[in-house]
Image (spheres, helix red, strand yellow):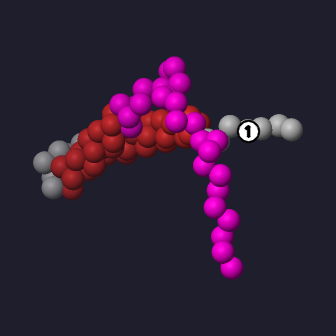
Amino acid sequence: MALARPDLGDISLRPARDGHAGGMTTRIGFAIILGGVVLICLRAANWVDSEMADIVSVLSIVVGALAVAIDGEEADQTTKPKRRDH
């Protein structure tokens, strides 16, 4: 049984809408996540000995993940097919 191929003719190839930062927000989000991971590694190696380091590392990973997810959702909106109401 062959699968039907989606109609790709309606996918928007326009540049991102106003207000979308392109890949910059994703890069910043990944940098925040990386900073949190580095802080966790420093804490595991006992180079940083503070409960605040644990809190900051976890919060930075969460905030970075939210930045990546929000940017991904915004970018996804620009590539969705246009809806046609008949």
Farthest residue in the bottom direction? 1
Q: Is residue 44 above or below residue 79?
A: below
Left or right of 30 on screen, residue 50 = left
Counting from the top left corner in percent of width and height, residue 68 is at: 44, 40
Left or right of 81 on screen, residue 67 = left
Q: In percent of the image, x 38 and y 34: which residue is there?
A: 23
Farthest residue in the top direction? 18
Q: Is residue 21 above or below residue 67?
A: above
Q: In percent of the image, x 33 and y 37: which residue is there?
A: 27
Counting from the top left corner in percent of width and height, residue 37 is at: 28, 49
Residue 37 appears in the picture as rendered:
yes
Which quadrant: the C terminus?
A: top right
Observer-nearest of 9 and 55: 9
Residue carrying label 1: 83
Q: In percent of the image, x 69 and y 79: which residue is there?
A: 1
Counting from the top left corner in percent of width and height, residue 80 is at: 61, 41
Q: Which residues are magenta?
A: 1-26
Instruction: Please say whether residue 13 is one of the residues in the magenta stretch.
Output: yes
Residue 53 appears in the picture as rendered:
no
Farthest residue in the left direction? 47
Left or right of 28 on screen, residue 10 = right
Q: In percent of the image, x 48 and y 35: which residue is there?
A: 71
Farthest residue in the right direction? 86
Residue type, numbered disc 1: Arg
Q: How many marks?
A: 1
Counting from the top left corner in percent of width and height, residue 32 is at: 32, 38
Quadrant position of residue 73 = top right
Instruction: Please say whether residue 22 is one of the residues in the magenta stretch.
Output: yes
Dot 1: what SS? loop
Observer-nearest of 17 and 72: 17
Observer-nearest of 51 and 41: 41
